[in-house]
Amino acid sequence: MKISLITASLNRCNVLMESLLSAIAQRDVDLEMIVVDGASTDGTVEMLKSLSTKEPRLKWVAKPDTGVYDAINRGIEMSTGDIIGFLNAGDHFTSPDVLKCVADKFANGAEMIYGDVRYANSQGRITRYYYASGYSPALLRNGFAPPHPSLYVSHDIIRRLGPYRENYVVGADFEYFVRMMLVNNIEGEYIPMEMVEMANGGLSTKWRHRLWTNIKEKRRAFRDNNLPTPTFSLFKRYIYLFNRPKR
């Protein structure tokens, strides 16, 4: 089964190449890599032009966009795979066999899967883990969603559910989980592996967005899907999400 891996990028040339090389290194998988760049001015376009002459699986576009979710939707429109996944610029796979495991799950009937991720600082030291073991859709009401960088979804489901909501700042991925799991009852399957190493410092990890914008947009995700809107229960996520011990 073919996987379309979408990367949104803006002036991340210094880390984008590492992400793409980690995708290129994936073994035994039918893969297309799609980079949607927001018209970077740091050499990204030149790098993508050069790399695409050597790597036929790489597709890319560089033009202004309205934000990361606009870029993700453009990438989905460009995709031709059976499975859609996401790799942030600056993140990389923890093993060359991650995408083979994903493809095998879908070949056995999965419609949506997710796994674990870990965070590293600029020195490469692991700072925290985001585990999805034992996850259930009911936890969305407590602010918990599986880690979006480990999400892979059938292209058929994406076509049916429609695009990400582009008028969210950091919460459109959470809203998509609400739409999939609570509205359309797609539970997904868990892969017990650390799939991606994420770089600290992304937009959603900034304290202003984690503590205010994040909560506000999570409440909105329920309203936008005509579901009862939780308030205080959403704060439970911040008590223990990133304090679980390593396996």
Image (cartoon, rainbow, N blue to C red):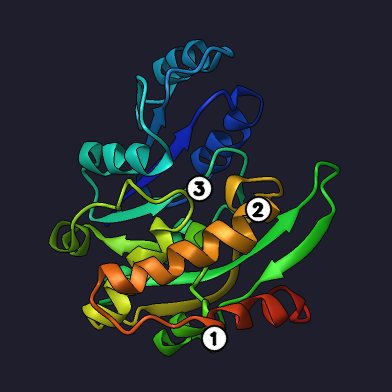
Please give the residue where the numbered disc 2 appears in the rendered image: 208
Alpha carbon separation for disc pair 3 and 1: 39 Å
Decide if residue 228 is on the left or right side of residue 68: left
Please give the residue where the numbered disc 3 appears in the rendered image: 26
Residue sitting at 16 percent across and 61 percent down?
Answer: 156
> Mark 3 or mark 1, which has the lower sequence index?
3
| Location of the C terminus (image quadrant) | bottom right
Residue sitting at 34 percent across and 47 percent down?
Answer: 167
> Mark 2 or mark 3, which has the lower sequence index?
3
Q: Position of residue 10 (x, y in %)?
A: 51, 27
Residue sitting at 44 percent across and 83 percent down?
Answer: 230
Task: Tell whether label 1 touches label 3 (CB within 8 Å).
Answer: no
Which mark is in front, 2 or 3?
Answer: 2
Decide if residue 129 is on the left or right side of residue 136: right
SS under mark 3: loop
Please give the residue where the numbered disc 1 appears in the rendered image: 233
SS under mark 1: helix
Q: Position of residue 136 (x, y in %)?
A: 44, 88
Q: Position of residue 243 (x, y in %)?
A: 76, 78
- Residue 38 visible in the snapshot: yes
Q: Identify residue type, mark 3.
A: Gln
| Location of the N terminus (image quadrant) | bottom left
Which mark is in front, 3 or 1?
Answer: 1
In this rendering, is residue 12 above or below 218?
above
In this rendering, is residue 230 above or below 179?
below
- Residue 111 visible in the snapshot: no
SS under mark 2: helix
Alpha carbon separation for disc pair 1 and 2: 19 Å
